[in-house]
Amino acid sequence: MAHSAAEPVAIAIFAKAPIEGFAKTRLIPRLGATGAAELQRQLIERTVHTVRKAHVGPVSLWCSPSKNDPYFVSLGERLAMALYTQRGDDLGERMLHAVAVKTATMPTLLVGTDCAIITPEHFVRCADALRRGADCVFIPVEDGGYILVGMRRPIPDLFTAIPWGTSDVMIKTRERIADLAITTIELAPLWDIDRQEDYDRAIVDGVLGPVDAASDTTRL
């Protein structure tokens, strides 16, 4: 799958630190704060492993709340991966900042860590779409948002006044794309792990093993 002779495409991974009470809060009633944080850690490392197997370009980790979180520092050192702190007042501003930084040198894919079924081939296909000249590429998720966006240059209108965290994210994004008349590729939708039913689906489908939260006294 390596594309060593092709134009490199950067991959920026957006991740929340696996801190109890900060990460995967909607799963705390099911997993407890400790279990939810452990799930977040697993999802981050799974995403990093998948991205690195795609071999499309340099990988960076965009960290919240800070790149100085001990977990991120350790991961960056272990994998020789560049770390950045997310900057901006909302998700759109944070993503636009990352896209602006990384596309200054090469096309860039930006991906979150919630999708456990994304594969190296997804990243290869998205990178190739940008290499062939598409202005942007998306992988939607079934709940109405998207798990990945790729661009050759910043397109601020795709990140401004979008109802982040709602089922209308991709609808509004498509409306903006139509208004801007830009070339866009969409892959088939995937699903991510955000709600309790998503976690159950991942366990039933064998995507993940159950998180051990037995030691978490906050578990409900």
Image: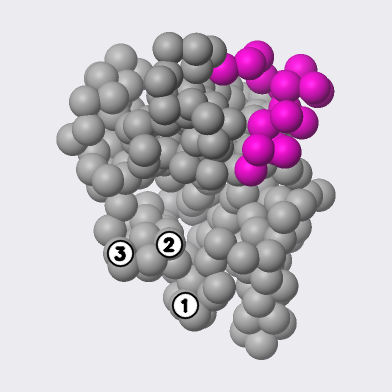
- Asked whether residue 197 is drawn in magenta, I would say yes
Residue type of the residue flagged with mark 2: Leu
- Please tell me the numbered disc located at residue 88: 3
> Which of pointers 1 and 2 lies earlier in the amino acid sequence?
2
- How does the figure colour the protein chain or chains? one colour
| Residue 11 in sight | no
Q: Which residue is mark 2?
A: 91
- Asked whether residue 49 is drawn in magenta, I would say no
Q: Which residue is mark 1?
A: 160
| Residue 160 in sight | yes
213 and 66: which one is in front?
A: 213
Residue in view at x 67 percent, y 32 percent: 199
Residue in view at x 31 percent, y 67 percent: 89
**Residue 67 location in percent, x, y?**
23, 38
Under circle 3, the secondary element is: loop
Labelled pair 1, 2 in contact (Cβ < 8 Å): no
Magenta-drawn segment: 195-211
Residue type of the residue flagged with mark 3: Gly
Under circle 2, the secondary element is: helix
Question: Residue 41, located in which quarter of the rendered image?
Answer: top left
82 and 39: which one is in front?
A: 39
Q: Is residue 29 left or right of residue 129?
A: left
48 and 100: which one is in front?
A: 48
99 and 173: which one is in front?
A: 173
Question: Residue 177, located in which quarter of the rendered image?
Answer: bottom right
Residue type of the residue flagged with mark 1: Thr
Quadrant location of the N terminus in the rendered image: top right
Labelled pair 3, 1 in contact (Cβ < 8 Å): no
> Which of pointers 3 and 1 lies earlier in the amino acid sequence?
3
